[in-house]
Image: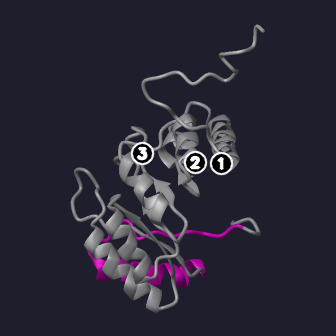
Amino acid sequence: YIPEGITLLPNTSGARNAEEAVRIARLAREVCHTDFVKVEIEHETKYLLPDNAETIRATEMLAKEGFVVMPYMFPDPIAARQLEEAGAAAVMPLGSLIGSNMGLRMRDFIEIIIANAHVPVIIDAGIGRPSQACDAMEMGADAVMAYTAVASAGNIPLMAEAFKHAIDAGRAAYLSGLGKVTEGQAVPSSPTTGYLH
């Protein structure tokens, strides 16, 4: 049973190349009645790192068939641009290894992707705590995916609620305009001269 108003996002996990991903996406379209697909291509099983070259090929093929393609990718800013050019509706760079809960280990590269993207950026993989999700949203990410962190929690509904609040807080902080970070010196918030006269 799928509640009304829910959009399914099938993925091509298990695909080892573009052709396998396209085949899985076509099957998912028939079964799930949706054009949305998360492209996920990994051809090694130790680190489960996405193959950006094959992902770009699959994205181009699927976009031409009318799919709304959301590719999971290694956070390479050049590959992110190429995915956009191939027709990606969003890009989904990993924060760290899938299921690791290690957080934003690829932060510097994700920031470059966010700064230059013309499509939504969704941080996918590695988000392990609500505070990490908040951090991702403060950076300007449009969304995060956090399955393992929620599914492995002692209290799943409470952890899901914690993530919701963290994501809302991070997005609000980003939209409000964060204060400038200074290095090596203090910046007074009140005048430091002339106030005793």
Q: Which residues are magenta?
A: 6-33
- Horizontal and vertical percent position of residue 38: 47, 70
Location of mark 3 (residue): 126
**Residue 84's x, y, as percent?**
44, 76
In the image, taking residue 68 as reference, residue 13 lies left or right, namely: left
Q: Residue 137: which disc?
A: 2
- Residue 110 versus residue 152 in the image, above or below: below
- Mark 2 / mark 1, whichever is N-terminal: 2
Chain-order first, disc 3 or disc 1: 3
Give, as a three-letter code, the residue at label 3.
Gly
Q: Quadrant of residue 130?
A: top right
Spatial distance from mark 3 to mark 1, Cα to Cα? 19 Å
Marks 2/3 in contact by CB < 8 Å: the verdict is: no
Residue plotted at (74% across, 65% down)? 3
The type of residue carrying mark 2 is Met
Residue occupying the far top of the picture: 196
Image position of 78 with respect to 129: above or below: below
Circles 2 and 1: CB distance less than 8 Å? yes
Give how far across and how far down residue 182 sits, in percent.
49, 31
Q: Nearer the viewer, mark 2 or mark 3?
A: 2
Residue at the (36%, 42%) spot, across then down = 105
